[in-house]
Image: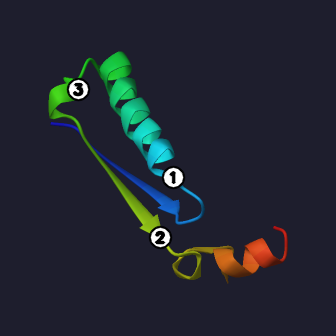
Amino acid sequence: MPYVNIKITNEDVTPEKKAALIKGATQLLVDVLGKNPATTVVVIDEVDTDNWGIGGETVTKRRKEGK
């Protein structure tokens, strides 16, 4: 049973976009590894930009600075 965990910032991710991520990740495992889509689990974790850091800065700060 494949398990995929997608972590994204919680910025304008619609239910439709989440559904597309789940469908796409599932299909990728089917296409590349021949996995059964019925037993493939995909979880999306949305992380607040204050809780995600890159290069020693929060994503919130980086977004404000245009990085």
Side of 25 relative to 3 (left or right): right
Disc 1 marks a residue whose amino acid type is Thr
Labels 2 & 3 near each other (Cβ < 8 A) = no
Q: Give the position of the C terminus as an image quadrant.
A: bottom right
Q: CA distance from mark 1 to mark 3?
A: 23 Å
Which disc number belongs to residue 47?
2
Q: Position of residue 65 (x, y in %)?
A: 84, 76
Residue plotted at (57% across, 82% down): 50
Label count reads: 3
Q: Residue at x 84, y 69 (%)?
A: 66
x, y (%) of residue 51?
A: 52, 80
Q: Secondary structure at mark 3?
A: helix
Q: Position of residue 25 (x, y in %)?
A: 39, 34
Check disc 3 and give the amino acid type: Pro
**N-term mark: 2 or 3:** 3
Residue 67 against residue 56 in the figure, above or below: above
Disc number at residue 37? 3
Q: Secondary structure at mark 1?
A: loop
Q: Position of residue 58 (x, y in %)?
A: 64, 80
**Mark 1, other Cα within 10 Å: few <14 / some 14–19 / many ≥20:** few
Name the residue located 52 percent from the left edge and 75 percent from the top edge: 48
**Which quadrant would residue 33 be assigned to in this image?**
top left
Labels 1, 3: front one: 1
Q: Residues within 10 Å of mark 3 (few under 14, many from 20)?
A: some
N-terminal of the two: label 1 or label 3?
1
How far apart in space, not on screen, are marks 2 and 3 (Cα)?
Answer: 26 Å
Give the mark nearest the N terminus, 1 or 2: 1
Q: Which mark is residue 14?
A: 1
Circle 2 sits in a helix, a strand or a loop, which is it?
strand
Front-most of residues 55 and 14: 14
How far is the residue under mark 1 from the one under mark 2? 14 Å
